[in-house]
Amino acid sequence: MSKIGFSPSQSIGDVWRKPTSALPRWLGGLLALVLLTAPSLQASLEDPDLQFIKIMSVIDQADTLKTNGNDPAARTKYQEAHRLLQNFRKNHPVWNPKVVAFRLKYVADRIEALSKPPPVAEGTETAAAEGRAGSSAALPAGVQVKLLEAGAEPRRPLRLQAKPGDQQSLNMTMKLAMDMELAGMPPQSVKMPAIKLDLAVAVKEVAANGDITFETTLGKASLAEDADALPQMADAIKASFDSLEGLAGTGTISPRGLGRNAELKMPVGSDPQTRQAMQQMNDAFSTFAVGFPDEPVGPGARWEVKLPLKSQGMTITQTATYQLAAVEGDTLTIKSTVTQQAANQKITNPAMPNLKMDLVKMTGSGTGTSTINLAQLFPSRASMDTKSEADMAMSLGAQKQTMSMKMDVRLQLDSK
């Protein structure tokens, strides 16, 4: 039975020969549909290592909600993680007790901090600015928007104009290819057949400050025929699709197109594979959102949106540059370039205490085009092609090794 946990007797070579059990989630990204539907993992869902990774996923969701400024939802997730950790410690008292105790304290501290009333700054200019719809002061935490060129006249502020009850039907296509290489080992290539997903978006509420709350529902999913893709991979993905249809998520987006939070509504008792697949689909869907500048702009305008991304202990800086290529009424054509960068940093995973990883470097880039109707939340048509590379140094006991990974992702969004 394959296990995600590592024992001191395992070599890095042993780990490499079982990539479905060793690949960290933050490097797998959109490959989760494949990695987490592998039969070897399904057969060991009761393994303590996998149970703890599931709990870490809940903590990661809570951290993301907190980073995005959704403190109430983050506190609820931390409370869920606290209950899961307590049950885990009761059922597995000898499994890495120091790690479990550390996570219990981490979660308890977050719950306590989020339970305190926020400071009030009445009468200040900043507090007044935060109440204005679309104000630059109301940006999500860590997000920076900078206007580079205002463009030609006539100029106007770009703001989403969705109303409660508005609906949008979309089809998203996602295709992934990955190359991995460990020094001294044969390189491995993974090509995933294109996944096609039907998505329904419904606007639920528009707040006084303009923030738009919406719900997304996953419809039918299918695989495109691809002679180059591995047949066993296609079979594994197809087997997971039945449980995905009908699953929903909620989110909030500002009138400037900047997301504040997103949370999946997972059925009680849903398996880790389904939860992970839905989270990655949600992340992919979110990449199509375009943030607008505060200032009025016209054709030819250029602006930059910089934001931090965090996943499983790694911090990434993403910078997107947008150009308003054309304007026709409320319909915009926007071209984009994206870069991602992560500095040298240590990666720790409590579920793998014997494996130490140092990120040497991570870089990524991409280009895209979007057609946006301001009366709708998401583009009526969009495409994004991205490439990324990551180099790591790993040590398992006395053994040290380096690994490199290259990933190509193509995303396409179309209105139905």
Image: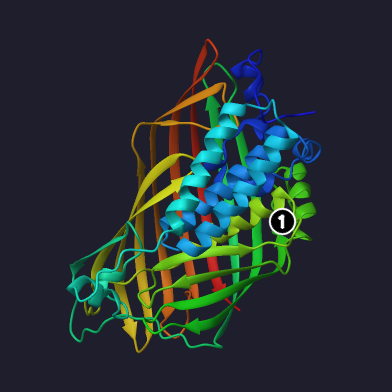
Q: Is residue 370 left or right of residue 234?
A: left
- So how many labels did they put on this image? 1
Colour pattern: rainbow
Residue occupying image coordinates x 54% and y 68% = 413
Q: Is residue 270 above or below residue 229?
A: below
SS of the residue under disc 1: loop
Which residue is more in the foreground, 133 or 400?
133
In this view, 354 is above or below 235: above
Q: Which quadrant does the C terminus fall into?
A: bottom right
Point out residue 187 in the picture as x, y percentages from the top left corner: 58, 27
In the rendered image, residue 308, in percent from the top left (x then y), is placed at 36, 51
x, y percentage for residue 345? Answer: 38, 32
Q: Which residue type carries mark 1? A: Glu
Looking at the image, which residue is at 57% across and 30% down?
99
Q: On the rendered structure, is 41 left or right of 185?
A: right
| Residue bearing the label numbered 1 | 225
Between residue 171 and residue 120, name the one nearer to us.
Answer: 120
**Which part of the image, by quadrant, shows the N terminus?**
top right
- Residue 61 in the image, given as x and y percentages of width and height: 54, 53
As drawn, 97 above or below 143: above
Residue 392 appears in the figure: yes
Q: Can you say whether 298 is above or below 282 in the image?
A: below
Q: Which class describes the residues within 10 Å of circle 1: few (<14), some (14-19), or many (20+)?
A: few
Q: Would residue 69 be found to the left or right of residue 205 on screen?
A: left
Q: Residue at x 52, y 53 (%)?
A: 62
Q: Is residue 135 left or right of residue 252?
A: left
Residue 228 appears in the rendering: no
Residue toward you, 11 or 303: 11
| Of the pair 371 and 270, the residue shown nearer to us | 270
